[in-house]
Amino acid sequence: MTIYDTRQRTIRRCVLAAAAAGALVAGACILPSLDTTAASPTEVDSGQTYSAPSLRSVDNFRDLAGPGGGYRTADGRAVRTGVVLRSNALNPDDSDFAVLNGQGINAVFDLRRTAEIDRAPDRVPLGANYVRVNVMGDAAPNLNAAVAESLSSPEQASALLLEANRQFVANANQRAQFAALISEIGKAEGRVLVHCTAGKDRTGWASALLLTIAGVDRADVIANYLLTNEYSRGAIDAKIASVLQDKGADAAEATRVAFGVNADFLEAAFDEVDRLYGTFDNFVETGLNLSAETVQGLRAKLVV
């Protein structure tokens, strides 16, 4: 049995145990580690500027801190590079897997449903902890399946994603899952990676939460969200071309909506925050139930 096979079996056991326990965060599944050339997690605090590599087979892999050495915060500081990475599902080819192993990733937070993981288990960087955070829960409607079924109408696809983003805020279970994720990231040592399937909806809202807590301006938070359209452009365009040939122009336009991101989707979540909690700070305190100590620790981790 290969080391990779052993790690994938470990992931599967962790997923099944988590599903049985029904925990908000399924805990860190510590995977078999090896001597590797991976950068030490202590480099996160070294003051060096991290530069995320471009991965062909994990095209939405990038640094949460954004381009230009990190987004600026309201107090004139900057988001620390190389602390939190974000991506789509970790299904790298061998070449990209070797690159991932050199990124010093200490923990991987997987936000997907059990069925998504069963179809495409993560290929976790060597030595990293695998943490399951099933944001939407297995009992909730399958967002990816619903998106696929909505491709006959761009309006329907848009409405679906607008509502999904509202539910990230309004749904108590989803709020609790995001809160657990934020807390775990705050406690994690070294460099971490957060992902879902496409790296745009669940990961998009998680990233927006982290950046807003760090003090990043809303315009930059949205700019970070919209970068999916650039990083995943090739895959999105290929899907659009295929649908255009098979199903016509309306379905192709619906595909563009469903597989990309639109500022209105993220704004829908922030609007729900304002509607239900009045301010983002109130949402963090009473919606996510994050303590002042947790928030302060997270800001210290994210901002330099």
Image (cartoon, rainbow, N blue to C red):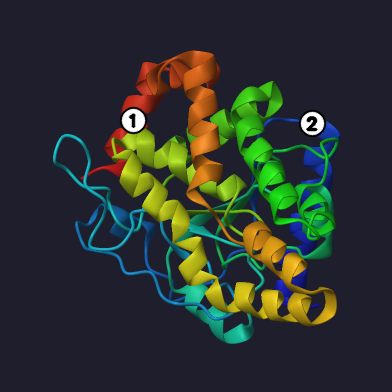
Q: Mark 1, residues whose alpha carbon is within 10 Å: few (<14), some, or many (≥20)?
A: some
Q: Mark 2, residues whose alpha carbon is within 10 Å: few (<14), some, or many (≥20)?
A: few
Q: Is residue 202 left or right of residue 151?
A: left
In the displayed structure, 44 sits above or below 39; it is above
Residue corresponding to mark 1:
297
Which residue is drawn at the image coordinates 61% and 77% (left, top)? 237
Q: Is residue 288 left or right of residue 245?
A: left
Closer to the camera in the image, 245 or 142: 245
Element marked by disc 2: loop
Closer to the camera in the image, 178 or 22: 178
Residue corresponding to mark 2:
22
Residue 67 image offset from top left, x and y in percent: 29, 63
Residue 245 image offset from top left, x and y in percent: 78, 82
At label 1, the amino acid type is Gly
Q: Earlier in the sequence, mark 2 or mark 1?
A: 2
- Farthest residue toward the front? 249
